Amino acid sequence: MVCCGDPAEEPDEYTETRPTLVVEVLSPSTDALDRGDKCVDYRRIESLKEYVLVEQSARAIEVHRREGGAWTVTSHGPGDTVALASIGLELTMDVVYEDVSL
């Protein structure tokens, strides 16, 4: 999770209510929840600009991005570059999966 708000505005030092970016690493036991209910809930957070799903068993990443009032989904695979506009970062898939054995 990346947060760009003022930490002093949070209820305590362990709580973040205004994330800008949330990244989830999918597993067989969490895949349906992360793509389903969690995705719907995260999209309701006004501050959230991107929700990223990273596969752990294949080189695959989905970037859900708020653009205006709508959400877009971009899928990335081997050889692609993943742009995280919310934080001004670009990563190649090779970097993301650098030490991951598939």
Image (spheres, grey):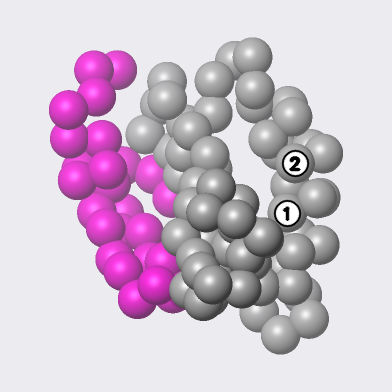
- Give left or right: position of 90 versus 67: left
Q: Residues within 10 Å of mark 1 (few under 14, many from 20)?
A: some
- What residue is drawn where x is 41% and y is 66%? 84
Say which amino acid is labelled 2. Answer: Lys
Q: Are marks 2 and 1 in contact (CB under 8 Å)?
A: yes
Range covered by the magenta-colored residues? 74-102
Instruction: Find out whether residue 38 is within the magenta segment.
Output: no
| Residue linked to disc 2 | 38
Which quadrant of the structure image shows residue 57? top left
- Give left or right: position of 53 versus 60: right
- Above or below, comparing residue 16 to residue 69 in the picture: above
Instruction: Find out whether residue 78 is within the magenta segment.
Output: yes
Say which amino acid is labelled 1. Answer: Tyr
- Give left or right: position of 78 versus 15: left
| Residue linked to disc 1 | 42
> Residue 86 location in percent, x, y?
47, 74
Q: Residues within 10 Å of mark 2 (few under 14, many from 20)?
A: some
